[in-house]
């Protein structure tokens, strides 16, 4: 299973037992790193865990390392990729990492399970999940997919599948097991499959030689934040300045990356030699075209934006879909104190 497959379908479950762990094969550090809270240069050391290996979806963080933005904010940031074993909640709560990545559903489920962590920013304003179909088969909208076979990963039951059942009348007998292999889809024009907009369409075009029909679930009302940044309640309470500086620097890194990604891309390819320029370019363009990062409230409030209204809307949607009970204190899943400063603030 490659990174894209694992991240988008395994780590997108809302259960707090989601598998994501700090890896060792792709690690990038800023200069002067040292095995203690402060470096010899007086920088605060921060360990930040990604959702998977280095790629364009994390470009802003690598950009902030490559261009010295983190150092300008008094930070020495170690970016750690993820791996297929372990539990990122344990790593975070146990202090092995300072901040990690998740999504709205996982954050609310953490509250339900009394995991003391909080979401402090949302890099992706729109969820990248998609359903993909063959062209010319009439499967060009979610409304037309009711009753048709769809390759679905097990984790879908914990996030987007209940939403599709509640809003579009999908039924469980439509589901077919998705084993993260494109071949069943490529061989059968009647099959639909799940994916993410920055990944599978690229792979399908490369392997199948055609452009698939791509339906972004965010366009149909699935309004989860994704690629969110989370940390412990303890860090927010004890050292909010550190959290603020990390977020400010990361967001500035994202603006820089979207304008000129070369420095970040060089580090991405250093950390992940299998990543190609073609794939990176495709992912960046899709992130821009789909408004994943700069869309929604980020247009006015800046990258990383979150609003109470958006969290409430997502929670209510998932309550209606039967994922959460309405007694869950979902407001404890997030904090708005560190973001929403406006585009001009981050670009200054």
Image (tube, rainbow, N blue to C red):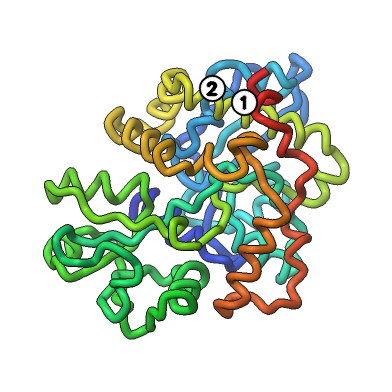
**Image point 44% across, 56% down: which residue?**
219
Closer to the camera in the image, 85 or 88: 88
Q: Position of residue 165 (x, y in %)?
A: 44, 78
Q: Is residue 186 left or right of residue 269?
A: left
- Where is residue 347? Give x, y as percent: 64, 21
Whether residue 142 appears in this view of the structure is yes
Identify the mark at residue 256; answer none if there is no mark.
Answer: 2
The residue at the point 52 percent across, 24 percent down is: 63
Distance, label 2 to label 1, CA atoms, is 6 Å
Q: Residue 73 lies in what quarter of the image?
A: top right
Q: Mark 1 sits on what residue?
A: 252
Up-down relation of residue 89 to residue 299 (above or below) = below
Quick one: quadrant of the N terminus? bottom left
Q: Are marks 2 and 1 in contact (CB under 8 Å)?
A: yes
- Residue 34 coordinates in the image, percent (x, y): 68, 24
Tell me the crowding category of disc 1: few under 14, some 14 to 19, or many 20 or more residues within 10 angstroms, Cα based: many
Q: Residue at x 58, y 24 (%)?
A: 64
């Amino acid at each position: 299973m490659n990174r894209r497959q694992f991240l988008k379908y395994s780590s997108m479950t809302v259960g707090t037992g989601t598998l994501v762990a700090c890896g060792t094969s792709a690690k990038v550090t800023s200069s002067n790193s040292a095995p203690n809270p402060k470096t010899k240069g007086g920088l605060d050391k921060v360990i930040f865990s990604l959702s998977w290996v280095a790629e364009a979806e994390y470009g802003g963080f690598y950009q902030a390392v490559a261009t010295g933005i983190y150092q300008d904010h008094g930070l020495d940031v170690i970016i750690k990729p993820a791996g297929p074993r372990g539990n990122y909640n344990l790593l975070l709560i146990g202090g092995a990492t300072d901040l990690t990545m998740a999504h709205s559903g996982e954050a609310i489920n953490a509250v339900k399970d009394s995991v003391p962590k909080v979401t402090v920013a949302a890099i992706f304003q729109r969820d990248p999940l998609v359903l993909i179909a063959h062209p010319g088969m009439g499967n060009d909208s979610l409304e037309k997919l009711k009753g048709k076979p769809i390759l679905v990963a097990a984790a879908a039951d914990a996030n987007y599948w209940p939403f599709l059942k509640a809003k579009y009348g999908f039924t469980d007998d439509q589901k077919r097991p998705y084993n993260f292999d494109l071949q069943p889809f490529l061989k059968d024009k009647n099959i639909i499959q799940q994916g993410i907009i920055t990944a599978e369409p690229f792979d399908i075009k490369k392997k199948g030689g055609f452009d698939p029909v791509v339906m972004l679930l965010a366009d149909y009302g699935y309004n989860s934040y994704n690629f969110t940044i989370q940390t412990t309640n303890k860090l927010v309470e004890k050292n909010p300045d550190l959290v603020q500086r990390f977020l400010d620097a990361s967001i500035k890194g994202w603006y820089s990356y979207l304008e000129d990604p070369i420095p970040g891309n060089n580090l991405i390819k250093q950390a992940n030699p299998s990543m190609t320029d073609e794939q990176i370019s495709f992912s960046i363009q899709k992130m821009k075209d789909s408004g994943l990062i700069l869309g929604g409230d980020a247009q006015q409030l800046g990258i990383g934006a979150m609003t109470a209204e958006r969290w409430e809307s997502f929670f209510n949607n998932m309550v209606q879909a039967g994922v959460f009970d309405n007694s869950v204190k979902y407001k404890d899943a997030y904090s708005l104190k560190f973001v929403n400063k406006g585009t001009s603030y981050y670009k200054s």
